[in-house]
Image (cartoon, rainbow, N blue to C red):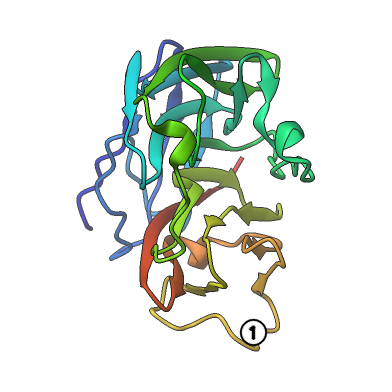
């Protein structure tokens, strides 16, 4: 029986009752902190007793934008259910300012997760305030950054010679077996980027009858089963470079 360590640092109380199949291995996590019980059951069970959202890693209070290259703000939040992160610029949702559809991530109420979101800022005005808004159910937590620019900001021209940046993903997520999960992978790229996923068996997700890569770049997995447990890697690549991340998925029995 492999050793299992699940860490969850949060402001709310989360109790997990876990039973593992022999030789099943779960990677170490800095997110989930639980009481663990072992048995011969092929599944492990989780019982969540409270709802919460918490920003674990906030962007700095101030940032200086350098002309000629983007400024990237990073915000990491955990929650039950799994949180969704949006960004605001001077009190207005960034997607609305940019005139694009403000897509909402599909979040199942049985999920617990930690999301990372990055905001790529190309040409801000001096003193613009950007706010990370983490939402989980009815719980909301925010943190803001004021961005200062140099005197030559008006001469800034965005460079297209940039590798893509993956801007939204779950580091870790737990969700009940039998439900459908969507693992986000949103990408900022100044040129056309190819996005693909590698599953928990190190196989590229292509032509899979069950796993589906959506037009948004997200990965959809229907009717979760215990064998879906593992790491899923999203890769975004253009002619100037690539970016990637790994989401660890924990299906559990209710």
Which percent across, then down, holds residue 50?
A: 56, 15
Q: Is residue 195 left or right of residue 246?
A: right
Which quadrant would the N terminus be assigned to in this image?
bottom left
Residue that mark 1 sits on? 208
Residue 85 makes an appearance in the image:
yes
Q: Which is nearer the eye, 52 or 97?
A: 97
Up-down: is 20 above or below 123? Answer: below
Asked where in the image residue 104 lies, by quadrant, the reply is: top right
Which residue is rendered at x = 77% and y = 45% of the image? 100
Which residue is rendered at x = 46% and y = 12% of the image? 12
Q: Which is nearer the eye, 234 or 63?
A: 63
Which quadrant would the C terminus be assigned to in this image?
top right
Q: Is residue 58 left or right of residue 181?
A: left
Which percent across, then down, holds residue 67?
A: 36, 39
Tell how many labels: 1
**Other residues around mark 1 within 10 Å, as few (<14) / some (14–19) / many (≥20):** few
Q: Residue pushed farthest left? A: 3
Up-down: is 196 above or below 143? Answer: below
Which percent across, then down, holds residue 188?
A: 53, 55
Q: Is residue 72 left or right of residue 119?
A: left
Q: Which is nearer the eye, 177 or 170?
A: 170
Which percent across, then down, holds residue 158?
A: 47, 52
Asked where in the image residue 225 lies, by quadrant, the reply is: bottom right
Which residue is rendered at x = 51% and y = 43% of the image? 174
């Amino acid at each position: 029986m492999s050793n299992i360590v699940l860490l969850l640092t949060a402001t709310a109380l989360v109790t997990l009752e876990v039973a593992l199949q022999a030789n099943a291995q779960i990677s170490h996590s800095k997110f989930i902190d639980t009481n663990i019980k072992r048995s011969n059951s092929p599944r492990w069970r989780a019982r969540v007793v409270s709802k919460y959202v918490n920003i674990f890693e906030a962007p700095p209070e101030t940032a200086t934008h350098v002309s000629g290259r983007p400024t990237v703000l990073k915000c990491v939040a955990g929650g039950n259910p799994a949180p969704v992160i949006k960004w605001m610029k001077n009190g207005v949702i960034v997607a609305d300012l940019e005139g694009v559809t403000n897509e909402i991530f599909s979040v199942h109420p049985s999920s617990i997760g930690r999301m990372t979101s990055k905001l790529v800022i190309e040409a801000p005005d001096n003193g613009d305030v950007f706010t990370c808004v983490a939402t989980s159910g009815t719980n909301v937590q925010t943190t803001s950054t004021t961005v200062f620019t140099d005197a030559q900001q008006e001469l800034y021209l965005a460079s297209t010679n940039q590798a893509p940046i993956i801007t939204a993903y779950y580091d870790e997520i737990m969700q009940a077996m039998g439900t459908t999960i969507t693992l986000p992978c949103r990408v900022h790229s100044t040129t056309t980027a190819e996005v693909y996923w590698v599953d928990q068996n190190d196989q590229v997700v292509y032509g899979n009858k069950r796993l589906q890569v959506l037009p948004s770049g997200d990965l959809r997995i229907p009717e979760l089963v215990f064998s879906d447990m593992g790491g899923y890697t999203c890769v975004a690549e253009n002619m100037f470079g690539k970016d990637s991340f790994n989401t660890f998925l924990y299906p559990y029995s209710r």
